Every structure is written in structure tokens, then in C-alpha cells.
Amino acid sequence: MARFGYTLMTEHSGPRELVRDAARAEQAGFDFEVMSDHYSPWLDSMGHSPNAWVTLGAVAHTTSSVELMTYVTCPTMRYHPAVVAQQAATVGLISEGRFLLGLGAGENLNEHITGRGWPPVNVRHAMLREAVQVIRSLFGGEYVDFAGEHFRVDSAKLWDVGTPPPAIGVAVSGGQSAALAGEFADAMIAVEPQARFGELFDAAGGAGKRRIGQVPISWDPSRDRAIERAHEQFRWFGGGWKVNSELPGTAAFAGATAYVKPADVAEGISCGPEVASHVGAVKAFVDAGFTDVAVCQVGGDTQPEFLDWAERELLPALREL
């Protein structure tokens, strides 16, 4: 049976609101919660981007049973992988083993800030491979030395790490990332309901492991308001990850989506009050073999009302799947 999650989206909510919504989502009955890890929102209209790890510590303390995940952290430029390992181990302990570390190759939007430029995708995947190896090694709790092409670790040790340590998920968007996930990860992460990702993951060693997806929806009692809000804050989503990973800032995303119309967004994102529409968006992932699907409600100021509705209508309907 599929598990259903809630997205704590740092791009459109402040840290206090995220902690509040995390507690309410657990109360509503969501199985897990995922948090984005960004330095910048996609568009200025989204308006937020607090530090994910500080917020996760508060969320771990505020919640008691729901599983927590990063969706996803890039452990290659903004953070050194040894620092990510320490952060993840700490959240794992605070949450008493409820944390899964989601990792990915990142986006220019967030990683260019350190001034190192933005490498091509092949290099990014090579960096991610080394980073996952470093993190895995440190999760063992012993001293680690590592000398790779992209990273060095000198006699590092995690003094506080749970047994078992956090599981690791790796984001997949094609053959290279699927091969990496199948070899090193405990779970596959994706934002497109494509069965081929699971097939590639299986072929690389991922058979029988979790597949975690995420789908944006824009619930509102008014379909027109739902579409307007999705267009204002989420029109960037339609570019696809090969485009979204390359653009450097909010101005670039605004320019790239200047001619996207509300009707175009409504074709790609389930909008409005009808539970059946939103269930259908989730079902596409379930039908593609995903074991876990997180919904991402568009609009930070809509979260309290959305969570009340999700408890009453959405989650009972999803359980029928």
C-alpha cells in the first residue's frame, strides 16, 4: 500500500510557519513529510527561503511519529558532504530515527552562490557519487579519510550518529542518476511519474527499494483562484529539470516563463476544489510504481486551510488507492 506525504516547501513559507504546518500535517494523518533545501525561491513571488536544516531540527522536536526527509539536499557545493553527514546524523538523533537523507545533484539557482561556477551535468553526477560515498562512510561512525577527484576528507568522524544511521535517497532524472541511486541509495526520489525511472533503478541494484515521488497541486475552493496562484508561484515547474537545474536566479525563471499562461499551468498542475482531480495526480505516481508520494500544496498562506481539507477529504480518498 502506498504512503502519502506532505511537502514543507521552504520557498513559500517562513520557518515558524513551516514548523506549525509540520505539526498540523502529522496530526492530519500524513505518513511522512519532505522539506526542500534551497538558498533561493524559484520566483520572487514565492517570497521565502529559510535554512532547511535549522528548520528541520525544530520540526523533528515538534513532531513525534511522522517520517522526515530532505527533498533534496545537494551535498557538493553549498555544503561539503562531511557537513551534510553531520547535519543528517544530528536530525536523525533528534527525530529518534525518523529521518531519511534525500540527496541530488542540485540546481544552479542554489549552488552558484559560493562562486565556484556551475559544472556540466556529468561532473555534477561525479561529484554526487563521491559525496554519497563520503556520507556513507561517515555514517559508519569511524574515522574517515577520503581522496577523490572532487572531495577530500581528512580524519573525519561523526561522534553522534544513530544506529542505524539515516537511510539515503538519491534523486533520479535519467540514466546516470538512476545508476548512482541503484548502486548507493536506499530509495529512489523523482518528481515525474515515469515507470522507466524505476526500471533503471532496478537494473542498477534498486529492486525492492522505496520509490518516493512528489506532485504539486493547487487546492482552493475556487478553481480560478487555484489556477491564478499556481501561475503566480509555480509556473517555473513546467520547464522540466534539465532546464530548471541550469537557470541561475529568479530573474532567469521569470524571463523563461514570461509567456506561460494560466491555462498552460492548469494543464500540468491539478487545480481547484475537486478531490478526484488531486487524487488522479497522485495516482499517476502510484501507477508508475512509486511506493511513497508527497503532495506539494501551492501557496504558503493556504497551508492551514489545505491541511484541514486534506484531513477531511484528500487523505481518506488517497487511502482508497
Image (cartoon, helix red, strand yellow):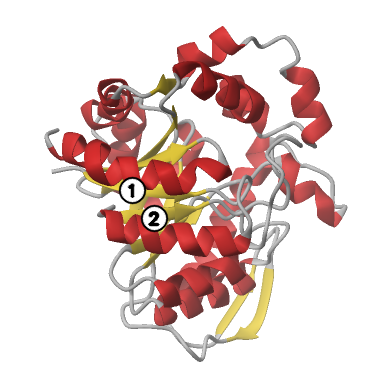
Asked if residue 108 can be seen in this view, the reply is: yes
* Cα–Cα gap, marks 2 and 1: 5 Å
- The one nearer the camera, 270 or 136, is 270
Residue located 67% across and 59% down the image: 50
> Answer yes or no: do the residues labelled 2 and 1 have beta carbons within 8 Å?
yes
What is the three-letter code of the residue carrying label 1?
A: Gly
Provide residue 218's location: percent of width, then percent of height: 46, 29
124, above or below 90, in the image: above
Residue located 23% across and 42% down the image: 312
Residue located 74% across and 41% down the image: 109
Looking at marks 2 and 1 on the same chain, the residue that comes earlier in the sequence is marked by: 1
- The one nearer the camera, 221 or 23, is 221
Provide residue 40's location: percent of width, then percent of height: 73, 47
Looking at the rendered image, the quarter that the C terminus falls into is: top left
Residue for badge 1: 5
Residue 254: which disc?
none
